[in-house]
C-alpha cells in the first residue's frame, strides 16, 4: 500500500508521511499542517492564506 500524503490546510503544500501535524478541532474537523508556521498563522493569528505570498493559494489567485 502506498504511503498516504496530505495537503497542508493553510499553505497547500504536500506533507510527506511521518512529518507534519494533525490538528483535530472541537467539531471533529481535521486540519493538517506542514509546519508550526502554518499552524500559528491559521489558528493563532487568523490570517488569510490568499494574502500571503509564500502560500500556493496566493499564487493561484494572482
Image (tube, rainbow, N blue to C red):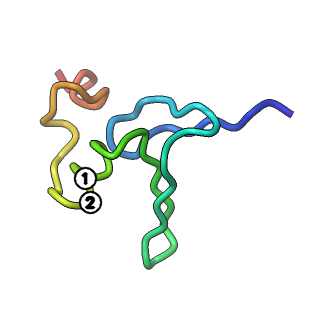
Q: In the rendered image, which residue does mark 2 sit on?
A: 43
Along the line of sight, which residue is nearer the eye, 50 or 32?
32
Q: Is residue 37 left or right of residue 24?
A: left
Label 1 residue SS: helix
Residue at image point 13% right, 36% down: 51
Q: Which quadrant of the figure has residue 50?
A: top left
Calculate the distance from the C-alpha at mark 2 to the C-alpha at mark 1: 5 Å
**CB under 8 Å between discs 2 and 1:** yes
Give x and y (percent) for residue 30.
Answer: 50, 61
Question: How crowded is the residue under tag 2: few (<14 C-alpha within 10 Å), some, or many (20+)?
Answer: few
Label number found at residue 12:
none
Task: Pick the quarter of the image with the C terminus.
Answer: top left
Q: What number of labels is visible?
A: 2
> Against 2, is 59 above or below?
above
Q: Residue at x 50, y 29 (%)?
A: 14
Q: Position of residue 15 (x, y in %)?
A: 52, 34
Q: Which residue is mark 1?
A: 40
Q: Nearer the viewer, residue 3 or 50?
A: 3
6 with respect to 52 (left or right): right
Q: State the image coordinates of residue 31 (x, y, percent, origin top left).
A: 45, 55
Mark 1 burial class by Cα count in 10 Å: few <14, some 14-19, many 20+:
some
* Percent coordinates x, y for residue 61 in the rendering: 21, 27
Amino acid at each position: 500500500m502506498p504511503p498516504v500524503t496530505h495537503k497542508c490546510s493553510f499553505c497547500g503544500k504536500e506533507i510527506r508521511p511521518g512529518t507534519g501535524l494533525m490538528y483535530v478541532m472541537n467539531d471533529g474537523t481535521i486540519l493538517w499542517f506542514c509546519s508550526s508556521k502554518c499552524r500559528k498563522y491559521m489558528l493563532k493569528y487568523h490570517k488569510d492564506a490568499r494574502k500571503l505570498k509564500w502560500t500556493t493559494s496566493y499564487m493561484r489567485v494572482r
